[in-house]
Structure formats: structure tokens, C-alpha cells
Amino acid sequence: MLQKLSSFPGVPGPVVIIVMDGYGLPKTDVGSAIAAARKPTLDKLFATCPNIRLKAHGTAVGMPSDDDMGNSEVGHNAIGAGQVYAQGAALVAGAIADGSIWQGQAWQEIVAGAKAGRGVLHFIGLFSDGNVHSHIDHLKAMVVQAKAEGVKTVRIHALLDGRDVPETSALEYVEPFEAFLAEISDPSFDARIASGGGRQVITMDRYEANWALVEAGWKTHVLGQGEQFASTAEAVKALRQRHPGTIDQDLPPFVIGANGQPVGTIEDGDAVVFYNFRGDRAIEITRAFEEADFDKFDRIRMPKVIYAGMLQYDGDLQLPKRFLVAPPAIKDTMGEWFAKSGVTQFACSETQKFGHVTYFWNGNRSGKFEGETYQEVPSDVVPFEQRPWMKSAEIADAMIAALKSGQYKTLRCNFANGDMVGHTGNFRAATLSVEAVDLALERILPVIDAMGGVALITADHGNADEMFELDKKTKQPQLNADGSFKAKTAHTLNPVPLILYDNVSGGKLGLKQTESAGLSNIAATVANLLGYEKHAKWDESLLQIR
Ligand SMILES: O=C(O)[C@@H](CO)OP(=O)(O)O
Ligand SMILES: [Mn+2]
Ligand SMILES: [Mn+2]
């Protein structure tokens, strides 16, 4: 049980946490879809409510350096756990730097497995240095080590990014990597890229939003079905020409081969490493490799392979069974301690972010704590620039109903809009997406008042706040060859807001802006609002009680 606060009994009604995914506070309004949006509710909140800035990137959320942008996993982990753990990106980099990854049983089984079979080791993963799901340097280190340990053949299945890195940067990764593979190959070692495609088109679906993506990935990587090219650089160039305006994350799948023969199908006896460290978009393909009674699509052929993930992606489901690096041991989350203290909890989002407010929130666990209720609003399966409002209205409906039920002491939701539409690089759609969130807030806030509650309105990292690649010196948008602004699809390094919406304390409650204030301070702040002391492990509360 959390201890009761002596100085404050807690607010009479529920405490609501609203995460506006991808809503950062930019240094300049140039290129900010948030600044361009008409958002009277948010404008009023910033003008009239206590509000501060929180760090949401870099070491403040467990990333290796302050050059690393934030992302949903590390952001929601930090919010939910009230603590900062070294995250996958940092843990894998560390395990490679000190060599402990090669000593681990999983890596040794992978190498032994490949050698016992046809000698083939496959790597599947996101092919960039975005450091949100993966890092290409980790892949490079594993290829070098595989050769040193006597693996004969390496085949890479490269998911093109353009979402955590500039939107048409694929060749900046592919060309040097294909050159590296050619150089490291010799008569005893043969390493090549074997297949690939845009990350939003194959393999990396999440939260079961669209299994057809995973099926398309399976056909490409495992079965080697699809259009063939002589090299990945050639595939990227040809596909871009055929699909003008298509950015890397949306490029169609391709297979490398010659004369109808793919160079790297996945066969019995091969070893496979899925080298993304982040779990949400790794779980479905992992299930396809691991589950005997898998029924999400027809695999046609299920090769018997030795499979490992870079990390374990789900601690409750123990998925995958074999993993190269132990994930952060996230403990003592607010979900767990609120449950132990009898605080009822409601969590809601649409499919694209559902796991963010449940699985990431609770430290990458899919099991519920007692007294938790989850509601998922099914996401549309469309390019989100076509529906920038996404399910904001339906999430507002669900939150309003849950609030009115009076059953929950704390409620949380995530609005995907600023992030998912921000990732499309479409400025006008991103503007609309922020306006849709504003409308949803306008509907939810009066219900919170009616229930005697308060809200903390925040974000997990920036995205819609910077929709153009800005010149580092002039801070003006970079231009494409045709004179248009170069779209930015990635997250940003900007801080995020924390707004306290409170019409019940009569001005008694405020927020402290501290030097280090970050996402990990939210859990303690929520506990105080509920009338509890923070857990000893949690970072300081930012609540001021006057
Ligand atoms: O879409 C995703 O997978 C990431 C970007 O790689 O975004 P977020 O962290 O906001 O989920
Ligand atoms: Mn996010
Ligand atoms: Mn995102």
C-alpha cells in the first residue's frame, strides 16, 4: 500500500492523465503543425492553468545520449514507472561494447544452431540508426562477430525506415552497408541483404492492427516471394521511380535474387535474429516464428529455426523465449502500486496506441493489475493523413462514459493524432490532427469538473511540433529539388507540456518547474493528487500544495 499524505487528502474526484502522443513544445513556430492549428481549448489551458515543461528525450528517458529523440516506448515506460531505466537502445549498445552479448547463451545457441544446419544466419529488423526500434551498428557488430565465430552465410532482411530518420534516406544506409557486406565476404563467408521493404508495409505491425503486414513480411523474408532485384540499392531506386512521392516507410516489399532464385529464403535448420530491441512492432512476427498453433495467417511453410529476439519483448508472455540481451527490469510501476492501494484504473486508446497506455505503461507487461479496466477503440486501417482525426472522438466518448460511471479513481488515455499523422510528413493533416485532439479535450474536461476531478495533460515526446527539416543554422525549412519544404517524419528532441487542469482545489494546487523535470516525475505527481505519498523508487512529485 502507498502511504496516505498527511498534508493533502487528495482531490475529491478522479485523476485523469491525458497523453497527446507526439505533442512537443518547439523552439520556433516555423514548421510547427501545433502552432498552425486552431486549438482554443489548449490555448486557454496554457494561458490559465499551471503548466511546465518536461524532458522527454535522451538520458531523461533512459536513452544512450541526449542526441536521441524520445519515443513512445521509453516515454510511456517513464510515465508509468515513475523511474528512468537504461532502455533497450542503451542496454544493447552496452552489451556489444563490453562483449557480454557474445557470452550469452542465446547468441551462442544462435551461432551453434546456424552451424549445425546449412550454416545460415538471418537478421531481420529496422535498417537505420534511428535508435527507436533498432540501430544498424548493432547489426554490423553481429555480422562481424558471426564471421569471427565461423558462420558461413549471413542473410539480412532489411526494413526500410524513413520514420525515425529522414523520409527518403534509405540509400544512405543501404549503399554503405552493401559495400561493407561485399568487403567482409570472402570464399569462406557470404553476407548479403536478401529481402526488405518499407516498415509500414511489411512485418512491423503492432497491437494486431493489421496482420496482413506481417503476412506480407513472412512471404518476403521467409518464402522469398515477390519481385526480384539484383541488389537492395537497385530495388530502392527502381521502386522509388515506379512510385513517385512514396517515402521509405511505404516502399513495397522486394526480394534479392537472380533468375527467379531468391538468395535468402529461411529454411529448416537456419538461425534467425530479429534485431529490433523495441517490442511493440516485434511481437507479431515473433509469434509467427515461435507459435506452433499460429492462426493469424497461413504461413504456408513453417521453417524449424533457432529464433532469438534482440530483447524479450513481453515479460508476461515470455516472448520470445530466446533473447540476446535482458530487457530493463521495470518494477514498481504506478499501475502496480495503485492496484495494491485499491485505486481503480481505466486505460483507453485506439489500437495504434492501445499497448502504449497498457503494456508500455506497465513496464512492457501484457497482464493487467487488479482493478484495471482497459478499453481499445479499433483504429482505422488507412493512411492516417486521410483520417487525421483518427479515433479522437471515440476515445473522448469512452473516457466520458468511464468518468461518468464513477468507477475509476484514475483514468488515462492516449490520443495518437499528433504522432501518427506527424509521421506522415503531411503538414496540413497534422494541423487538423491537433485540432481534433483539441475538440476531444473540450468535451472531456467539463465532465472531469462535474466529477470533482483533475487532469494532467501531457505528451510522450514531440512530433507534430516539427514537420519540416530545418536548416541547423538559419532555422528555416530545407528545400526539396522542386522548391517545396522537406518534410520531417521523425520525433523531435523538444520538451513536452505538463498542464494541471484543476477546477476543484480553489487554486490550492500548482506545478513546480524544476531543472530536471521529466516524464518520470508524473507518477509521483499523480499519487499526490490522489492523496498518496509517492513510492520510494519514484522520482519526485512536481505537485505544489499551497
Ligand atoms: O511508429 C513507431 O513505431 C514509432 C516511431 O518509430 O513511434 P512511437 O514511438 O510514437 O510509437
Ligand atoms: Mn509516441
Ligand atoms: Mn511516433
Image (cartoon, grey):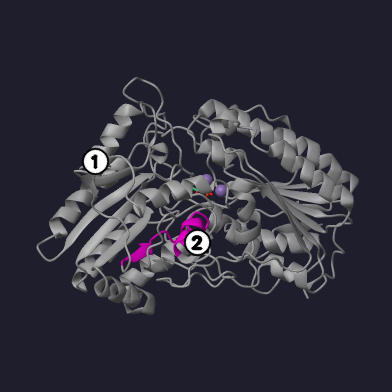
Instruction: Determine the secondary structure under disc 2.
Output: helix
Q: Is residue 234 left or right of residue 54?
A: left
The label on residue 90 is: none
Q: Position of residue 387 (x, y in %)?
A: 60, 31
Asked if labels 1 and 2 touch by Cβ distance under 8 angstroms, the answer is no
The label on residue 229 is: 1
Q: Nearer the viewer, residue 117 or 63?
A: 117
**Alpha carbon of mark 2 to alpha carbon of mark 1: how far?**
29 Å
Q: Nearer the viewer, residue 30 or 322?
A: 322
Viewport quadrant of the C terminus = bottom right
Which kind of residue does numbered mark 2 sit on? Arg
The magenta stretch spans which residues?
Answer: 270-289
Residue 541 appears anywhere in the view: no
Viewport quadrant of the N terminus = bottom right
Residue drawn at x 19%, y 67% is 152
Q: Is residue 140 left or right of residue 323?
A: left
Q: Is residue 453 magenta?
A: no
On the image, which quarter does residue 185 sit in? bottom left
Which kind of residue does numbered mark 1 sit on? Phe
Residue that label 2 marks: 287
Instruction: Determine the secondary structure under disc 1.
Output: strand
Q: Position of residue 317 (x, y in %)?
A: 57, 69
Give above or below for 440 relative to 511.
above
Q: Is residue 331 left or right of residue 258?
A: right
Residue drawn at x 42%, y 32% is 475
Residue drawn at x 41%, y 34% is 469
Residue 7 appears anywhere in the view: yes
